[in-house]
Image (cartoon, rainbow, N blue to C red):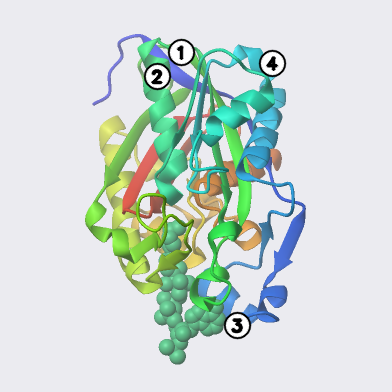
């Protein structure tokens, strides 16, 4: 419930993103698999995505996004004492990709680790970093979503290979004193859920402890679609209930970018006006944990999101995992 006791808040200091050099259009994919620009646009809203090339990995994209976020914040890498990276496509099984980004940035203090909640990973990472910051144990966090899903796609499977893309986005969060009221800048609430009974609907069919291979992404798209809007509503409603805020209070709704139809149906169901919805799935495809920070970057760069705006992020991912965060920018 709403409290007005002074407390620490995780406040957004900076934001950055990075995309691979190579842009891949629907027409280019249609030359390799039995699909068409028309089908992909109609069913998903996707027009293009980016695929990592040689030398581009989850850690190089994540580090580039982190550098951009630090520059935006006017901070040095040394000012960061926590790195939480959301990814399902790590550079290696171990060590964590977060530690590789930490090394790339030249940071040798504090903690760095990965969080794995597939497409909901960025929301999980924001929630985890928020809990560290508001506890007072850490001061400034880089929260990164970075993915190279092109490396786990089966390019013989047209039902999945047209949907995903690569990229990274990063947020700098800083612990600052707040009043405890909803008018505070920073993360106001996070809502996380999971239900592992749904594994078979969206998974990768390989792993060190089962097949000793990396595996490929498998999805029952229709099944995921069927559950998606209900899960979104659950955590969006949860965030409103936790804060006493409503859809009318929102300045921007920045959902995970998987499918235009899911985004539109979720916004409509929650009574969120269409002009408040940030959509970037057309230009990035589904970049899993990177999609929300990439969308935030677009909406900040073009001047839509301003300091003080109330921003709702939410995502649904494999597991299933689902979650939301309400942030006063
Ligand atoms: O990030 C979170 C996880 N991901 C998601 O949120 C994805 C959720 N699911 C979806 O977005 C949609 O279910 C899809 C975009 C994956 C599929 O859309 P759909 O409207 O559910 O299509 P469908 O699976 O019912 O397929 C319709 C038809 C089928 O042909 P028939 O059986 O009707 O003859 C498919 O074989 O479309 C066919 N199809 C394709 N046609 C051209 C499937 N993929 C393609 C393709 N190109 N790439």
- Residue 119 place in picture, x, y as percent: 45, 51
In the picture as drawn, the residue positioned furthest to the bottom comes out as: 34
What is the C-alpha distance between the residues marked 2 and 4? 20 Å
What is the C-alpha distance between the residues marked 3 and 2? 45 Å
Instruction: Specify whether residue 146 is in view.
Output: yes
The residue pinned by badge 2 equals 132
In this view, 231 is above or below 45:
above
What is the C-alpha distance between the residues marked 4 and 3? 46 Å
> SS of the residue at dot 3?
loop
Q: Earlier in the sequence, mark 1 or mark 4?
A: 4
Query: Does the closest atom of ligand 1 sit within 8 Å of the Cβ of label 3?
Result: yes
The residue pinned by badge 3 equals 35
The residue pinned by badge 1 equals 138
**Residue at the image position 34 percent from the left and 48 percent from the top:** 322
- Residue 195 place in picture, x, y as percent: 24, 51
- Do residues under tags 3 and 2 come within 8 Å of each other at their CB atoms? no
In the picture as drawn, the residue positioned furthest to the right comes out as: 21
The residue pinned by badge 4 equals 76
> SS of the residue at dot 4?
loop
């Amino acid at each position: 419930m709403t409290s007005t006791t002074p407390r620490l808040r995780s406040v957004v200091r900076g934001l950055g993103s990075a995309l691979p050099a190579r842009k891949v259009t629907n027409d280019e994919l249609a030359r390799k698999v039995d699909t068409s620009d028309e089908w992909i646009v109609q069913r998903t809203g996707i027009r293009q995505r980016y695929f990592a090339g040689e030398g581009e990995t989850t850690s190089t994209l994540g580090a580039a996004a982190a550098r951009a976020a630090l520059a935006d914040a006017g901070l040095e890498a040394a000012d960061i004492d926590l790195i939480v990276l959301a990814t399902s496509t790590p550079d290696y099984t171990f060590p964590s990709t977060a530690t590789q980004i930490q090394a790339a940035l030249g940071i040798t203090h504090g903690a760095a680790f990965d969080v794995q909640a597939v497409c909901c990973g960025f929301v999980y990472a924001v929630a985890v970093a928020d809990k560290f910051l508001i506890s007072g144990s850490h001061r400034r966090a880089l929260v990164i979503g970075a993915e190279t899903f092109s490396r786990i796609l089966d390019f013989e499977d047209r039902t999945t290979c047209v949907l995903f893309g690569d990229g990274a986005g990063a947020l700098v969060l800083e612990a600052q004193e707040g009043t405890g009221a909803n008018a505070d800048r920073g993360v106001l609430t996070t809502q996380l859920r999971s239900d592992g009974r749904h594994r078979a609907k969206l998974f990768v069919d390989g792993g060190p402890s089962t097949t000793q291979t990396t595996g490929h992404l498998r999805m029952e798209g229709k099944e995921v679609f069927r559950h998606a809007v209900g899960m979104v509503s659950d955590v969006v409603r949860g965030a409103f209930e936790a804060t006493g805020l409503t859809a009318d209070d929102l300045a921007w709704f920045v959902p995970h970018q998987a499918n235009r139809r899911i985004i539109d149906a979720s916004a409509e169901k929650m009574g969120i006006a269409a002009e408040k919805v940030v959509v970037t799935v057309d230009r990035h495809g589904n970049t899993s944990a990177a999609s929300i920070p990439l969308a935030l970057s677009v909406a900040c760069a073009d001047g839509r999101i301003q300091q003080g705006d109330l921003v709702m992020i939410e995502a649904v991912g494999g597991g299933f995992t689902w979650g939301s965060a309400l942030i006063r920018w």
